[in-house]
Amino acid sequence: MQWLTSWMMKEGKGIRKDEPKKTGLALFFSILLREPWELFKLNLLMLVLSIPLVTIPANFAAASRICTLMIEDEIVFLWRDYWRAFARMALKATGWGILICMCLAICGYSAFIYAQLAFHDVAYVAPAVLTFAVTLFVAMVGVCLFALMSKQDLSAGRLLKAAFYSALARPFSIVAGIGFAMTLWLLHVFFYPASIFLPVVLNFSLGTLAMMFGAYRATDFALELQKSASSTKSAEKSASL
């Protein structure tokens, strides 16, 4: 494990002033190379704060805020920024987290039942595919919702509407982020016990970073859309007066 410690403690190369801003996968991998120690510490925080279970939504929301700051290339003071975000979003994140989990449980169980029936009767293939698609879309909306919470403090209605717009705007990148996070946990399961330290080292924080990265552009689009709509309404009200 000495190589892992050395890699995480190694001082970064820094960023040249004239270096062009990275985008896409280049940005994602640059974050991994630039912030390995912060990601490791964030992973430990997420691991510990997930133990009480009830704190998981607020924990995920706070970690989403940290990952968003990393994506925006902002300076991160992990301990301070994490707890500020945790305290600010705890109630809202818990409420939304419970609602999303309930929807996922209902849709996921329906997809499972229809999939079992589809093995015996092809008439159930279409309902199985449909319920699976709905389950995936609910997960996409949930990721976008937490990504939006990490960016702006929106009302419940505007937050949910923006999350729907985000999921529809760039579905493939969001699905890729969710798939990446799920792959980390599947690797942990398949290679256990050799992979016993994966959750301790990177599964929580890296999975969150991947999901926030996948939803980043989509949520930007939704926020710009809402901003344009608000500006148009304000202009129409001014013209009517």
Image (cartoon, grey):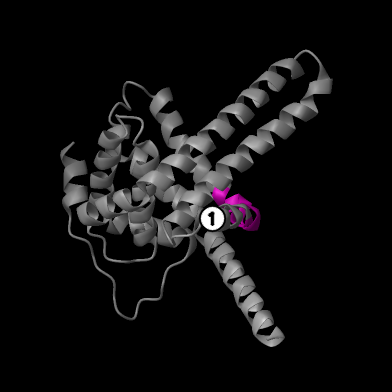
Q: Residue furthest right?
A: 123
Query: Residue 82's x, y, as percent?
Result: 27, 52
Secondary structure mostly seen in magenta is helix
In the rendered structure, the answer to whether residue 216 lies left or right of residue 232 reads left
In the rendered structure, the answer to whether residue 54 lies left or right of residue 75 reads right
How many numbered callouts? 1
169 in magenta: yes
Query: Residue 143's x, y, as percent?
Result: 51, 47
Query: Residue 144's x, y, as percent?
Result: 52, 51
Label 1, secondary structure: give it.
Answer: helix
Residue sitting at x 40%, y 76%: 20
Q: Is residue 63 above or below residue 76?
A: above
Q: 130 or 4: nearer the eye?
A: 130
The three-letter code of the residue at mark 1 reads Leu
130 in magenta: no
Residue tagged by mark 1?
A: 159
Query: Residue 197's x, y, as percent?
Result: 27, 30
Task: Assign the C terminus to one quadrant of the image.
Answer: bottom right
Q: Is residue 148 above or below residue 220?
A: above
Residue sitting at x 62%, y 78%: 234
Chain part drawn in magenta:
165-174
Q: Is residue 22 above or below residue 46?
A: below
Q: 47 or 158: nearer the eye?
A: 158
Residue sitting at x 21%, y 52%: 79
